[in-house]
Image (cartoon, helix red, strand yellow):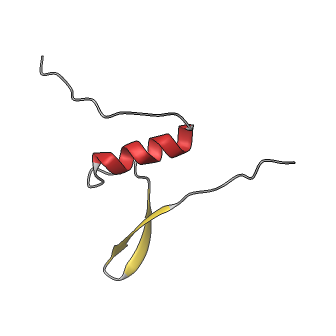
């Protein structure tokens, strides 16, 4: 049995028009959404960590 490959696209609606975005490069996307996206793409569990001020 062959594995099924999925393609995921992310969109936002701006001025009534749908625009495709890359969630890893958009600052307005919440960190939780980025973690879920990373989990889905890699198939591994990721967690959010804070940067320590140097």
Residue at horizontal 35%, vertical 83%?
16
Q: Quadrant of residue 7?
A: bottom right
Q: Answer above or below: position of 39 versus 18.
A: above
Q: Is residue 1 left or right of residue 36?
A: right
Q: Position of residue 24 (x, y in %)?
A: 40, 46
Specify the farthest residue to the left: 53
Specify the farthest residue to the right: 1
Observer-nearest of 32 and 14: 32
Q: Answer above or below: position of 38 versus 21.
A: above
Observer-nearest of 53 and 36: 36
Q: Position of residue 44 (x, y in %)?
A: 52, 34
- Can residue 42 be seen here? The reply is yes
- Can residue 25 be seen here? The reply is no
Q: Position of residue 29 (x, y in %)?
A: 30, 54
Residue at horizontal 40%, vertical 79%?
17
Residue at horizontal 75%, vertical 52%?
4
């Amino acid at each position: 049995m062959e594995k099924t490959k999925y393609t995921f696209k992310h969109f936002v609606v701006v001025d009534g028009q749908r625009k495709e975005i890359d969630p890893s490069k958009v600052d307005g996307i919440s960190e939780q959404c980025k973690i879920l996206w990373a989990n889905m793409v890699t198939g591994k569990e990721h967690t959010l960590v804070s940067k320590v001020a140097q």
